[in-house]
Amino acid sequence: MRQVIRLLSSRGVFLHQIGEIVYRLQKPYLPSLAMEQCINAVETVLAKREVQYAVYTGVALDMLAEQGGLPQPLQDIVAVDEPLYGLDEVLAMGITNIYGSIGITSFGYLDKEKPGVIGDLNKNKGSRVNTFLDDLVAGIAAAASAKLAHNAKDSKSQGDGTFQA
Ligand code: MG
């Protein structure tokens, strides 16, 4: 998991920034939610192998596009973040799907609203390409948020009022 966290930070994305998005998504539904639980949920998502593979794949394509290293026409499509490309969202939905359909709704919302670091990745990028990364971050945040929602439901039915990571 360290490797994927290191890769994300090298691209300007830190765990607490993803945690903040999760907090914003879930706080209205879970009033006692703490930031630490959000960051823990993000870590749980990042511990999954299929999530790590999605991040490695998407970020590699961003980096190759930055270096002009992709074959055409993919190079131009990824470098300009062509809106009709859509495979950046498809890859990220592989992350969102791990906790079921609840994550997909949040993903759609994040993709549209682009809160916090997701929006930052879309502006002032300079020579950076973040075509895949913004969607990957939205996917991770949506999955972590779905995980918290499921935990809350489980602990309610168990009656202990606590979350389990
Ligand atoms: Mg994108």
Image (spheres, rainbow, N blue to C red):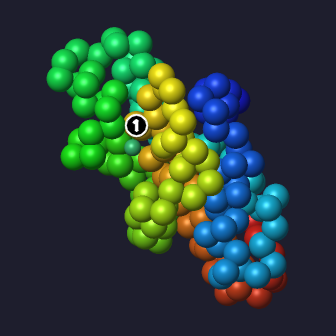
Kindly tell me whether mark 1's CB lies below 8 Å from ligand 1.
yes
Q: Nearer the viewer, residue 15 or 72?
A: 72
Query: In the rendered image, which residue does mark 1 sit on?
Result: 131
Q: Is residue 165 left or right of residue 131?
A: right
Q: Quadrant of residue 163?
A: bottom right
Residue type marked 1: Thr
- Residue 3 seen by the camera: no
Q: Quadrant of the N terminus?
A: top right
Q: Quadrant of the C terminus?
A: bottom right
Q: Position of residue 156 (x, y in %)?
A: 71, 85
The residue positioned farthest toward the left in the image shown: 73
Question: Helix, strand, or loop for circle 1?
Answer: loop
Q: Position of residue 68 (x, y in %)?
A: 34, 13
Q: Nearer the viewer, residue 82 or 101?
A: 82
Q: How many marks?
A: 1
With respect to residue 1, does 117 lie above or below? below
Q: Is residue 71 left or right of residue 21?
A: left
Q: Quadrant of residue 116?
A: bottom right
Ligand 1, by image quadrant, is: top left
Q: Is residue 88 left or right of residue 127?
A: left
Q: Position of residue 22 (x, y in %)?
A: 64, 62
Residue depicted at x 66% and y 68% = 24
Residue depicted at x 61% and y 69% = 25
Residue depicted at x 42% and y 19% = 66
Residue depicted at x 54% and y 36% = 124
With respect to residue 135, does 80 lie above or below? above
- Residue 61 seen by the camera: yes
Q: Nearer the viewer, residue 17 or 153?
A: 17
With respect to residue 69, does 82 lie above or below? below
Crowdedness of circle 1 by 10 Å Cα count: few (<14), some, many (20+)? Answer: many
Q: Position of residue 41 (x, y in %)?
A: 68, 56
